[in-house]
Every structure is written in structure tokens, then in C-alpha cells.
Amino acid sequence: MLKDVTLGQYFPGTSFIHRLDPRTKLIATFVYIAALFVAKWYVSYAVVLALLIVCITVSGIKPSAFFRGLKPILFIIIFTAVINLFATKGGTVLWNWWKLTITSAGAQLAFLMVARIMLLITGTFLLTYTTTPMALTDGLELLLEPIKKLGAPVHEFSMMMSIALRFIPTLIEEADKIASAQKARGADFETGSLTERAKALLPLLVPLFVSAFRRADELAVAMEARCYHGGEGRTRMKKLTMCPADWATLIGSGVFLAGIIVLARYGL
Amino acid sequence: MPVIKTESLSHVYGAGGPFESVALDNVNIEIPQGAFVGIIGHTGSGKSTFVQHLNGLLAPTSGRVLLDGEDINADKKRRHDTRFKVGLVFQYPEYQLFEETVARDIAFGPRNMKLSKDEVSARVREAAFFCGVSEDLFERSPLELSGGQKRRVAIAGVIAMRPDILVLDEPTAGLDPAGCAGILKNISDYRAATGATVVLVSHSMEDVARIAERLIVFDEGRVVMDGSPAEVFSHTAQLRAIGLDIPAAADVAEKLRALGVPVPDGCYTVEQLRDAVLALRKEGGTC
């Protein structure tokens, strides 16, 4: 039941992309997303798609993993496609029935919007698939260093994030275990009306919350017992360093974004 | 006819994914009605995966699980019904308690069986009795009990379904010696009173040596030994090779033998060893 959750799943590997500094990957991903929103027409999309395919090939992760990740957002994709398909006016009318009309402009927009969402999700998956959650939050904390000077609790924020990420698999496993235990007592999570099913979740949610609070409590005590007191004067176990490959990747991303901007200028 | 039988049962976790692992590999086991079987193996040997197949919580990757000669995974209804016949107590079962009162929590299983109200409350009282849960606790919240009491309430929740086969995964883990002995006694009492078949998973050799009549040893998803405790504990070297300990009494017996004391085979509980040594002294032996 909960096996489909791929959020934050890391695929171990040693590819070029795996070895990049998390900061580089974060910046490159933001550049990629920016490029995706700048992109106007098929040529730009094709360039973005080509880059994504190259990166996925280099990462050595099976493409099927990316398709599996798209499954949970299938509803959003279909919803976007349908809204754009019927709500866009302009161009020639392709199909008409009662109040529903599909125009050529609508079909094009629907196609591009779906392509944009899929490219967006797949691209960000590449980041989480090749970077451990710990490296990711470390990278984010360092990138947000400037805001720290303004008094924002960057370290606390990134600590919260890494704890949250760290406990997602634990909680999923726990939920699975509790669900199995309740199923062993004849609980049925799969049949019945919507209200019945919502009620059936109670034997799962109550123990899950109890254990989440217990874990939070234990973790807080364990951290205090080891004298954790926040970010002030704290050194790192793993120092992140930018290699020439990282700088090259950043320059490459910049060139890529510039290219997409130029293409968009010409309406391609 | 065996009450439970597995035919070339195999299970693979995350097949095709990056973390694929074979948890069970061609397991063939027959358990006769009324048996008391202990399953031992170190962490990750596949014993927990195995017991989750017995009530259909996990479906085999290949092979079959037969209950009274019929495949439990034949259809959805049979799988659902199997869960009431094969009661499975998970590891740390106290983490599954959720109801407002102890009585309601124990009644969760019987209620899912769609039994009448009177029948449900009769079963709650019966199960509480078997597990040593006092009726004074019935209206308390299960979350405010002590660890040992919670464990008893959770086991009562499974026993209340009156399963023909009771499967327990590490029921004594994390309890103090008195708590362990109490729970093992409750299990024996339940079996004596109802004639149920019991399958007990444990990595505590002392526990299984004391109460099981037959031992099955798992290693890396395969059954490596299957026999009476005396047989299994005589393969000391092989048990140690797969990372298992032998009961302290069997260890002492072995060391005595090495010193030239003729301790007979099949001494694996403290009581047996005591009797054997006393018998030797009477004969005027070396002790």
C-alpha cells in the first residue's frame, strides 16, 4: 500500500551526477526549472528534454524508476490536460459537442503544459534520486548562509528538514507494520464506503501518531544528552568542496539557461 | 494431514528494484495439528517473513501456503478468513494498541469477525484470563499501562479471535525475565486449554529450548535444520557457524563432556542438566 512512495528515495551510485556537490545540483536544478518556465515552444522543450535524457543516462538510474515516480501525480497531469484542452480559446475548432469545444490552441497548450509538468517532476527526481537527503539539506544550509546574517534560523530550519526527511522511511515502515498487525486482527483497509474506509484508518493512525510523538521525544532527549544547542559555532563532519567538475556544471547550466532564453526570444 | 504446509515457498523483497533481496528460498515445511514449533534464526534469516506468509499478510513470490490442505491465497475471501484462523502476534505488539479502553482493544479482532455482542465480550474476558490481564484494567486506556501489561493486552487481542494456530513473533523481546516466563506460561496454558497449534519465533535459545517440541532453524532464507530440540542443539558447531547461540545448559553440558564427564546427550535446559548431573553424582562419578 505504501510501497509506491518514492519521495526522497535515493538510488546509490557513483556516476558523474552522484559525485557532484549537492550545492551544484541544487543550483542546476533551479536553473533547469527556470529554463522550463522560460521555454515557449517545441524547440525549447525538445532541448530541455534532450538535456534531461542525457542526464538520466549519465546517472545510470533505470528510466522505469522515473516513470514510477510520475504515477502518484497522474491525476494532476490529467486534470491539467483536460482544463487546458477545454478552457483555451483560439485557433481552429477541432471538435465540438454541446458546450465543449477543443481548439487547436487548446490542444497545443494542453500538450505543452503536460510536457512541462512531466519534465519538471522528472528533473527534480533526478536531484533526489542521486543525492542523499543529508547531503541535500547540508547543501541547502550552505546555500542559505547569506540569509543567516539577517537573523533567519537557517541551521534550525535545515536540521528540521533533515530530521523530517530522515523519518519519512521510518514512519512508512512503521505504518506498514501497524497496518499488517491490524490486518492480522481482521482490519480491512480496502473495501467499504468512503466513510467506512476513513474509519478503518483509525487503528492505523492512532498508533502511528503515538509512536511519532514517542520518537520525537526520544530524539529530543538524545540530542540534548549529546549537548546539541543549535547552529552557533557548530563544525561539520563532512566538509563540502566544489571541484572543477562542479564549476563546469554550473557554467554549463548558465549557458543552457541563456540558450533557452534566446530561443524563447525568437518564439521557438 | 498437516494443518499448515508450505510448498517450495519463496519470497523476494523489492523484486527488480535497487535493493532486491531474497528473504525466503524454497521453504518446505509441514506442521501437524497441535504441534508446538519453535523457529529460530539470527536477524534477517527470513523467520519473520516466513510467519507473515502463514496468515496471508505476505503473498509468496512463488510457491504455496496450504491451510488444512487449501491454498490460503486462492482468493481474497479465503485470505481474509485465514487471518482469524491463524492468529499472528507481531514483534512489539504493544505498538498496535489504539482503542480508548483495554476491553475495546482486545475486542477489535472479534468485532471484525462480526460476532454477536455477547460473544465478543465473552471472548474478551476469556482472552484476558489466558493472558493474565486483570478485569480491573478493562476500562483503562491501553496507552497508560506498563510495557509488560501492554504486551499482554496486545497478545490477548489476537487470542480473542480464538485462532486454531497461534503464531508469535518474538513475544518476549525486551521484557524482564519474570515477564518473559509469564508470557511463555500464558502461551502454554492457551495451548493446553484449546489444543491450538503454536508457532513461536525467537532468537532466545533459552525460551524455545524450554517450551518448543520441535525446532526449525532458518539461515539466509532457507531451512537448515528441522527436528526435536535435542537433535538441533546437538549440532553445536553448525549452530555457531550460522551465528546462533546454544542454550547455556547445553553449553555447560558440552564443556563438561570435554572435561571427561559423561553427561548424556539431550541436556539443553537447566532442569535436565541438573537432573543428569545429580544422577551422575549418585553413581559416584567424577562430579
Image (tube, rainbow, N blue to C red):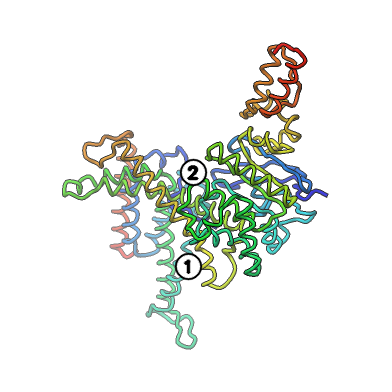
A191 vs A222, nearest the viewer: A222
Residue at x-position 41% and y-position 74%: A84
Measuring from the top left, give residue B66's x and y in whole percent: 76, 52
Q: Which residue is identified by label 1?
A: A75
Measuring from the top left, give residue B213's x and y in whole percent: 74, 38
Residue at x-position 42% and y-position 52%: A212
> Would residue B61 be seen by someone viewing this image from the given angle?
no
Task: Name the chain letter of the residue that bears numbered label 2.
Answer: A
Instruction: Using the image, tell me which numbered label, if any, was put on residue A60.
Output: 2
The type of residue carrying mark 1 is Phe
SS of the residue under disc 1: helix
Task: Name the chain letter of the residue that bears numbered label 1.
Answer: A
A222 vs A197, nearest the viewer: A222
- In the picture, the quarter occupied by the C terminus of chain A is bottom left
Measuring from the top left, give residue B105's x and y in whole percent: 55, 59
SS of the residue under disc 2: loop
A192 vs B271, nearest the viewer: B271
Of callouts 2 and 1, which one flags the residue occurring earlier in the amino acid sequence?
Answer: 2
Measuring from the top left, give residue B203's x and y in whole percent: 61, 36
